């Protein structure tokens, strides 16, 4: 703990002269990150690689130190200083989480040791590991190595190496491969940052979706609303709000309801006229009476008449100005080190009006009831019961399991939502648009073609295959403005499914790749995957979140939408799909949202390809889909696997013409049903985007284009 305090003090000393620069939001964030990385992080991490077997207090101190260091980058706007989680601050600083930071420092120290080839040091580490076992530095080095494997994978590790450090020969091997180990560590750090950013985005979307549902008038029935087995442990008697413990109730009463300690109305100075001790200040006497173990407080309240509220408030303000209020604990310099002193004869004289000299006897219920009206009484001595806090060890934040835990919370919470259909807002009558997210390159018979042939609404094809800027779904400010203007009648989205695809579960002899990137236990990313696979998973997750956000906004402002994605396997809990997510389950709690499962094969494909549509305000979609099925259809090929280095499912990216016709007809039908408003909107702001996205260009033919390069740059920005 002393070492941690020194590190914290020196780190804050480094940050102090730079605080205004680091928190200046007008400066480039990357420059501020570099300044923090060069000036503060090395001081904070000095000797951190040598620490091991941190106890609960030391672990909490380390996390608090890292939190405070990252917090230096937060821009403050006057008194507005919102709460930030450690994950958000790690993304803002572009740094690892606190526990991951310790792993990194241990690996760096390990690399220095193996490069130095100090055999005596290695012998000492191995001997210490045998002596202390799980509490040794050697054991925590093993945890750091497993952290690398969990974040960047161990697919390219030799059979003998990092996991065999109990053998001295493995240390010599590590010395020869230190460059590779250092590269693996850097890859693990990058993957860890991606997973942290994913966790932050998931939590932000979860909160945003809940807020949007409440704005729609949906009702959320919490578990406390439906549980009648036992009364809540801590309830505010004034407003009925539920808290985790009675101490939280007392804080709530003081801050919200203005309840104060009752004994403050019986104290005018620092002298206790029951035990005849002077505690130097009024605040310290209040502490003696309210928190002490004597019965002085009872005798004070029996002996004297209380001051009025105004008189007590004036004395509180006087203490604050003197720096001796209860929360300040101020003492004069000559009184330091002296808790109390005997009262003089002058100090023993009564100042308040005496009510009674009968001070003996047990406290009665009538007295407690009377004194409670004056204010809060001492804990377990007539006031609230003493809180029973469970002692628990410190648990570090793990973003890999954190994403899975967050999804489980959302899944269980989904059934607690109840919503009614939202009355559609009137849309403008002069011009209306349909947003086609992830439309791909333009082709004959696509959804945009059918809408253009009809001519009543204007399709906008949004895809990086058409334009690298306007086609980027992450740059959605323009589309949000268009939606809020009441100009969007509908939207269709088919976000990338390569990380969700059930084809990844097909077993092929002798092949390691492609392998599943999601499963039932880790829906937002399986650990022990390569850096490339981790990046793919993060991109797929963030694109799905952004898509759902835009589609929900279209619905909120009067439009209809469809979301297409592979059907997945409902029978196997290991094979996770977006349709098993709690975020989609929430939407299905309202009858305006429907899930339709069908086959693309009978609509014009040579393979079956089970698909699911999530639709809003399109009640005829299912009927229209099955009415255009081709009678007697049989599959002519099977999807799955890899042929000539390409996915066999690649041909299924393009919708059959008949399916595109159905989607277009549904939006045209809804356009004919939607109410109109006479309000005119200026659409000049959308003209450049419409012009750029209407150009015909086959982006899929460009071999240099990859989905990750197009989309991931904007995911590293803290918002």
Image (spheres, rainbow, N blue to C red):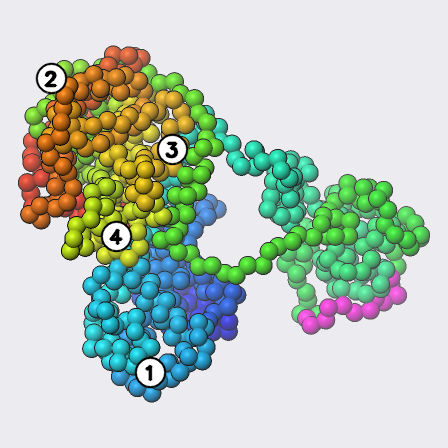
Estimate the x, y position of residue 324 in percent, counting from the top left.
67, 59
Q: At which x and y percent is residue 392?
A: 55, 59
Spot occupied by residue 169 in the image (x, y as percentages of width and height): 26, 80
Residue 312 seen anywhere in this rendered image of the structure: no
The residue located at (23%, 41%) in the rendering is 502
Q: Identify the secondary structure beneath mark 2.
A: helix
Residue receiving disc 1: 122
Q: Residue at 9% of width from left, 49% of height from top?
A: 645
Helix, strand or loop status at disc 4:
helix
Residue 397 located within the stretch drawn in magenta: no
Q: Which residues are magenta?
A: 336-348
Task: Evaluate whether residue 651 shows in this view.
Answer: yes
Gap in Å between the C-alphas at discs 3 and 2? 36 Å
- Foreground of the two, 424 or 539: 539
Mark pair 1, 2: CA separation: 76 Å
Q: Main secondary structure of the magenta part?
A: loop
Q: Nearer the viewer, mark 1 or mark 2?
A: 1
Q: Earlier in the sequence, mark 3 or mark 1?
A: 1
């Amino acid at each position: 703990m002393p070492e941690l305090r020194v590190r914290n003090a020196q780190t804050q000393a480094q940050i102090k002269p730079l605080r205004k620069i680091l928190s200046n939001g007008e400066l480039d964030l990357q420059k501020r990150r570099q300044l923090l990385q060069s000036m503060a992080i090395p001081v904070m991490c000095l000797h951190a690689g040598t620490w091991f077997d941190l106890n609960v207090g030391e672990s909490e101190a380390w996390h608090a130190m890292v939190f405070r260091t990252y917090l230096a980058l937060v821009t403050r706007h006057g008194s507005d200083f919102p709460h930030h989680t450690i994950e958000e601050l790690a993304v803002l600083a572009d740094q690892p989480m606190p526990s991951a930071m310790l792993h990194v420092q241990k690996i760096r120290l390990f690399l220095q040791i193996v490069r130095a080839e100090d055999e005596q040091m290695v012998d000492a580490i191995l001997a210490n590991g045998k002596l202390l076992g799980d509490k040794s530095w050697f054991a925590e080095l093993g945890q750091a190595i497993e952290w690398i494997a969990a974040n960047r994978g161990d697919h390219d590790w030799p059979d003998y190496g990092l996991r065999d450090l109990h053998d001295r020969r493995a240390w010599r091997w590590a010395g020869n491969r230190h460059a590779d180990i250092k590269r693996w560590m850097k890859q693990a750090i990058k993957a860890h940052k991606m997973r942290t950013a994913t966790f932050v985005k998931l939590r932000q979307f979860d909160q945003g979706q809940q807020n949007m549902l409440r704005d729609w008038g949906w009702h959320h029935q919490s578990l406390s609303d439906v549980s009648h087995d036992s009364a809540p442990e801590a309830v505010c008697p004034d407003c009925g709000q539920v808290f985790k413990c009675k101490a939280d109730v007392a804080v709530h009463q003081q801050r919200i309801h203005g309840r104060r300690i009752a004994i403050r109305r019986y104290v005018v100075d620092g002298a206790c006229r029951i035990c005849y001790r002077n505690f130097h200040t009024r605040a310290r006497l209040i502490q003696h009476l309210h928190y002490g173990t004597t019965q002085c407080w009872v005798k004070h309240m029996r002996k004297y008449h209380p001051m009025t509220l105004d008189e007590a408030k004036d004395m509180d303000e006087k203490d604050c100005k003197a720096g001796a209020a209860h929360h300040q604990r101020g003492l004069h310099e000559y009184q330091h080190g002296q808790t109390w002193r005997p009262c003089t004869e002058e100090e023993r004289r009564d100042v308040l009006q005496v009510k009674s000299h009968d001070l003996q006897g047990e406290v009665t219920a009538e007295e407690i009831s009377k004194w409670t009206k004056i204010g809060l009484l001492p804990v377990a001595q007539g006031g609230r019961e003493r809180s029973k806090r469970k002692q628990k060890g410190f648990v570090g934040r793990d973003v890999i399991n954190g994403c899975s835990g967050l999804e489980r919370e959302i899944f269980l919470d989904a059934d607690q939502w109840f919503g009614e259909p939202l009355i559609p807002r009137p849309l403008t009558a002069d011009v209306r648009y349909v947003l086609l997210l992830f439309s791909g390159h333009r082709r004959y018979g696509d959804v945009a073609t059918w809408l253009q042939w009809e001519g009543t609404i204007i399709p906008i094809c949004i895809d990086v295959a058409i334009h690298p800027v306007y086609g980027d779904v992450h740059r959605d400010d323009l589309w949000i403005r268009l939606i809020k203007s009441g100009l969007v009648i509908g939207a269709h989205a088919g976000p990338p499914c390569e990380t969700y695809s059930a084809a990844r579960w097909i077993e092929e002899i002798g092949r390691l790749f492609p392998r599943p990137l999601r499963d039932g236990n880790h829906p937002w990313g399986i650990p022990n995957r390569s850096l490339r696979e981790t990046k793919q998973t993060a991109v797929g997750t963030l694109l799905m979140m952004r898509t759902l956000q835009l589609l929900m906004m279209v619905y909120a402002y009067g439009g209809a939408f469809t979301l297409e994605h592979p059907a997945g396997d409902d029978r196997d809990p290991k094979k996770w799909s977006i349709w098993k997510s709690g975020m989609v389950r929430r939407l299905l709690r309202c009858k305006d949202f429907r899930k339709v499962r069908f086959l693309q094969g009978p609509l014009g494909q040579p393979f079956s390809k089970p698909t699911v549509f999530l639709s809003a305000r399109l009640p005829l979609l299912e009927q229209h889909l099955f009415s255009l099925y081709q009678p007697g259809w049989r599959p002519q090929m099977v999807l799955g696997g890899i042929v000539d280095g390409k996915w066999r499912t690649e041909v299924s990216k393009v919708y059959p013409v008949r399916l595109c016709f159905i989607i277009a007809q549904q939006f045209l039908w809804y356009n004919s049903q939607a109410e109109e408003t006479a309000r005119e909107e200026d659409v000049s702001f959308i003209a450049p985007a419409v012009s750029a996205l209407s150009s015909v260009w086959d982006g899929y033919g460009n071999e240099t284009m990859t989905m990750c390069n197009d989309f991931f740059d904007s995911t590293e920005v803290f918002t």
